[in-house]
Amino acid sequence: MKERGTIIRWTALSGAVLFLLSGMARADDRLVPVGAAKMDVTPAHPVVLAGYGGRTTELEGIDTRLWARAMVIGKEDPVAIVVIDNCGVPAALKARLARNLAAEGIVPERLVVAVTHTHNAPNLVGYAPVLWAGRMSPGQKERMSRYTDFALEKMAEAVRLALRNRQPMRLSWAQGRASFGGNRRVMVGNEWRGFGLQHGAPVDHSLPVLAAKDRDGKVRILWANYACHCTTVGGRNHVSGDWAGYANESMEEAFPSATALMTIGCGADIGPQPGGNLQIAERHGREIGKEVRRLLGGGMSELGAAPTVTETTVELPLVDPKPRKHWEELKAKGGFDGQLGIAMLKRLDAGKGVPSHVPYPVTSWRFGKDLAMVFLPGEVVVDYSVRLNRELAWPRLWITAWANGMPGYIPSRRVLSEGGYEADFSQVYYEQPGRYKPEVEEVVVGAVHRVVGEEFAAPEDQKPAPFHRPPSGEDAAFEKLVEWAAAPGSPEEATLGKLVAKHLPAAESAIRKINIGTAESTLWHNLAGDFVERVFIRQEKQGAEVGWESQVRRKGTEQRVLCFSGGLGWSAEPETGGFVLMMNGEERLRFDLTRRLSRWSSNDGSVDLFYLPTWSSDLDTGGFFLLVLGDQTAADGGLLTFSVRSPGEGSKRWFAIDSKQEVDRLVPGLIKALKPLAP
């Protein structure tokens, strides 16, 4: 019996050991060889920068370093992605890189070359060829070519080092959210009016993140993707990685053992909001880093194998080619259009003809049924993300644009119908002979469906993706106002805030009718940062004036409180004595630009003007003006006339009132936001 008991105990123990070993084996089955590396690609010599046609000289300085970052997955037939801080890598340069990596077993179909689309990196040979055509010296051409060779070699080195750095890792992913991207296509009615912020227009605020951890659970690689232009810094002629560069820095600061990669989604018509300088770019980048940290602290979905790759190349249809005479006339115009004419005439002279289609490779990496990554060339507008997230299983979908080629903007049917930059004249810079036909959207979407397969089709009961509706600008403005009311910046602001909160319940709309006077009209940021129609005057000329009529409706009050929305701006311009507020033809007080809650009073104390900014940039503000009238100047139901005029000249400082006043709708929100200050 004793021997039998011993045998039973050992049998049970051996079974437990086998169970544990089998569990470890199953865990090891989900380990995938993964490696990453990065190489510095900051230019060491003068070179022209891509991104802005207004720049005419080579770089003037370096704000941040530029990098080429690579990641490889798999042992046999690995896939590789290399992301460079650059505006764009043309398909011909990707082909050169693939040939360079052929000896390492990286075949072109399994190589993705992507960019962060920073507009503050050197122009690579072949990128947006019309941008610098005809205005570069031989020396500038040579330096651009030399930098291109340097960047390609560093990208190849990054991939080779990533291959050597491979080790067994666990892959996981999750979808988070960022919110600084806003649709930049400003539309008035059905007409494109330029770049700005169009609230209510589609965005893609999804932030998919992939993480690779070693056997010890240490994060070794992070890859994030967000749909937004890298144009925060603007046309400053300095090298920088813009917000994507700061996002990589933020991720690597949080996880010091990791190499970070930032790619860009369908953000061709999405711009960073706000923009203007490096500090704002860093703030956007840190928003990405913060969300990545949050995701890694929660639940990530594990990916158990290297991806399978599917690729197809389709032809995107352009409008029918124009005859030779058209290109000769275009050449005679000069400028960018003239350079496009020259390029098309060269093609005709060489017997190539004017292109009628654009070759367009579409690639997918599928991690089983858990995740489908899609890679699209060019600057793809957000409508593609919106549609594909509707037609495919968006909780398992990741879309990266600016990958595997730079044919130019890829507009949707809607954008083509509206026209404007992304649909029309951007094509010139990319040496495209005309706009796309409307069926371009069906061609691209159909190709994506084919490469991801039926297993990623949207289920019938799929809820809409939550990433495509931007938060209300007004809601965001009032949220900031709530934060301020809870903790005003100074005792003076607290006192003024209490006065405004006291007067608001009696406020009525100040503007019954606008009297244009010598004012101008334009689109500019309102109280929420939206672009709206505004009437404004500048201090360029003495006597510039805009006025309005107010009809007093409220009865039985000792004070009249009139409210209107508008703004003040261009604080960098010289001071010229501010603005004069006239009431019924008499000067009552003077006020000037301010960035905080302010109050001005008439000499006799009968009129107070408050200004409460709810949106601001480095130079401008938008918000609410409150006129408090302490006497019975107008009988109940009577009219008052007001105007604001410039007493000085020689400055572009401005005062504006919104053409469309919605004070009656907005005042309840103000009252609620300032409740902590109410008596």
Image (tube, grey):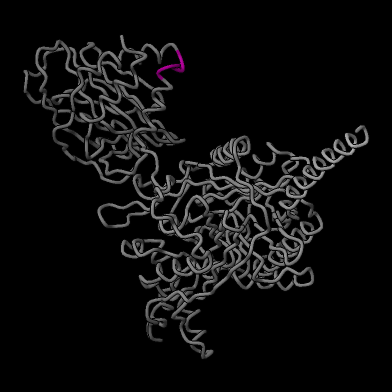
Q: Residue at x 45, y 65 (%)?
A: 410
Which of the 4 image quarters holds residue 105? Answer: bottom right
- Residue range in magenta is 485-490
User: Where residue 238 appears, x then y in whole percent?
Assistant: 61, 50
User: Where residue 107 appears, x then y in whole percent?
Assistant: 70, 71
Which of the 4 image quarters holds residue 278? Answer: top right
116 to the left or right of 356: right
Q: Quadrant of the C terminus?
A: top left
Can residue 183 be seen here? The reply is no
- Residue nearest the observer in this picture, 593 or 255: 255
User: Where residue 161 appears, x then y in whole percent?
Assistant: 79, 57
456 to the left or right of 77: left
Give above or below for 543 relative to 305. above
User: Where residue 219 appears, x then y in whole percent?
Assistant: 72, 42
Q: Residue at x 11, y 26 (%)?
A: 551
Can residue 148 be seen here? The reply is yes
